[in-house]
Amino acid sequence: MIRTHVLICGGTGCTSSGSKKIADLLEEEIAKKGLAEEIKVVRTGCFGLCALGPVMIVYPEGTFYSRVKLEDVPEIVEEHLLKGRVVDRLVYRESEGEEKVEVPSLQETGFYKTQLRVALRNCGVINPEQIDEYIAMDGYSALGKVLTEMTPEQVVQVMKDSGLRGRGGAGFPTGMKWEFAAKNKVPQKYVVCNADEGDPGAFMDRSVLEGDPHAVLEAMAIAGYAIGANKGFIYVRAEYPIAVQRLNIAIGQAREYNLLGKDIFGTGFDFDIEVRLGAGAFVCGEETALLTSIEGNRGEPKNKPPFPANKGLFGQPTIINNVETLANIPQIILKGADWFASMGTEGSKGTKVFALGGKIVNTGLVEIPMGTTLREIIYDIGGGIPNGKKFKAVQTGGPSGGCIPAEFLDMPIDYDNLKKIGAMMGSGGMIVMDETTCMVDVARFFLDFTVDESCGKCTPCRIGTRRLLEMLDKITSGNGTLEDLDKMEELCKYIQANAMCALGQTAPNPVLSTLKYFRDEYEAHVVEKRCPAGVCKNLMHYEIQPDKCRGCTLCARRCPANAITGKVKEPHVIDQSKCIKCGACMEGCKFSAIVKK
């Protein structure tokens, strides 16, 4: 009889930190102690606390170990699993230097206690490669309910009543999209899952696929029943090998259990799913480009209308939902539209998953009710800004989004509020920036990404974004003018109005939002030829303060360009014409004698 379950994160983050080897060794050590019949090791999906990986939780007591290493495994088995004594030094602490160890449940930690997990409900809880564990969590009950108790029209109405909006970007109402496709009375329709998560810093969809793939399969089958489709495709980027592997395992298991394929639940409903791998083109996150890629063609967007719900994959009516959107659907069916609509705000129902990254203490995956403020996300859940730095801005929506300054920290986050201030929800990437971040450089970074990822089909995007990038390069190199700022704004608005697809239409957002809220930084680069954050290399230099320099020669020895000269025990000097501004001298100085200006 199993008395203890040891859950180990098997998401990409923890896997890269060695969690698979830890799980393997754990099973070996458990077997050596003769405990294999009593203790079960469960490889789960992402827990969310990516900064603390590899993560391990021991149930039933709920002991939460973080940053576990291979060499810790024998001690955990000997002390905790055999003798029942918690390994104190490995227990997660809410704050650095905390001596007394209270062992709260995971849900009582600061990171989790204000979260509300719907799309992530099974991530970190079940083994995603075992269909029986998903079924034990009411898995496929929603599919059984719709096939045996509901008409397709009733399913569509539930989705409309729930207020669920697409979690992949613009937030189009899911039920309305399904209704458009359902009204097309043709023999062949398709359901497509968009798992082409291309935003820098975003890993929400990947984590759901890795931790709860059956939820997506079940939701796609429900969607197929609602609109009258018998075929589904999951378009996932090939850079997600763990997600792809678990999807294929899940599809095989679902077919074996007759939960995919012919005559599901004996109702006469047929539905099957195939996986299609994307090659990593950001533009293929746009729905028409994605469909074109599935068809085997170059991933380029098409003019709309017609919209995919009327004429999509292979010319047939098609609905496209992203992973997070689909992950909500089984729970909406089981618990009802009113349950889901009771969460969130008037115009943005339910919860939203965000990938917290950048200058934040708790890097990881969070799910919060719509309407939660940025302050709650960044400080209560994210743990604030490390090293005592000051919060400056947060970028939401990736290259399509905008930078939100500190003045909006107490603004409730939902689709409409973000749109009002020039940002967007996007798929849910949230990159936090502190006072050491240059906002001009941030805009340049995202434009550089967009220029590389533009498919080149339309001139406003192909040429316009490149011209924008050239202007930003000019400014960050110290050659910009005030006139350039006005030209940039004008060009941004032209691109927004004339680009063919959402990639081009939203590409100017990082530039416009930083111009709006951080114009003083742009003007400092242009007028004063200075980067206030000390990031843009052409606008900064290092100086040695003579009164602090002890002449230890360490900086001169570390300098790769031989730009520092001076005698032993005498102040040194940096030759600015030779300095490559790498910062090695400042990092190595023991007397804080070198400053960056």
Image: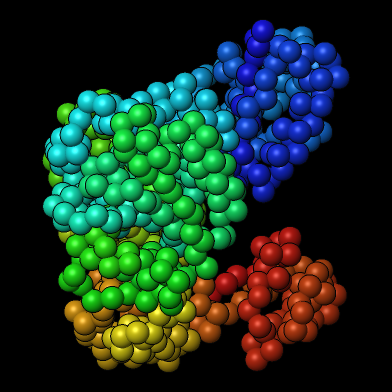
Q: How is the image coloured?
A: rainbow
Can residue 46 be seen in the rendering of this structure?
Answer: no
Q: Answer above or below: position of 210 versus 560.
A: above
Relative to the observer, which residue lies in front, 224 or 10?
224
At x 82% / y 24%, what residue is drawn? 29
x and y percent of residue 259 in the render? 43, 34
Can residue 455 be seen in the rendering of this structure?
Answer: yes
x and y percent of residue 517 in the render? 27, 67
Q: Answer above or below: position of 261 versus 236.
A: above
At x 40% / y 23%, what residue is drawn? 138
Relative to the observer, which residue lies in front, 204 or 225?
225
Q: Answer above or below: position of 43 versus 410.
A: above
At x 73% / y 13%, what residue is drawn? 37
x and y percent of residue 116 in the render? 35, 31
Relative to the observer, which residue lies in front, 18 or 248?
248
Relative to the observer, which residue lies in front, 322 or 341?
322
At x 43% / y 75%, what residue is drawn? 297
x and y percent of residue 20 in the render? 71, 39
Residue 537 falls in image quadrant:
bottom right
Residue 32 falls in image quadrant:
top right
Q: Answer above or below: position of 408 versus 513.
A: above
Q: How many marks?
A: 0
Q: Where does the N terminus fall, quadrant-wise?
A: top right
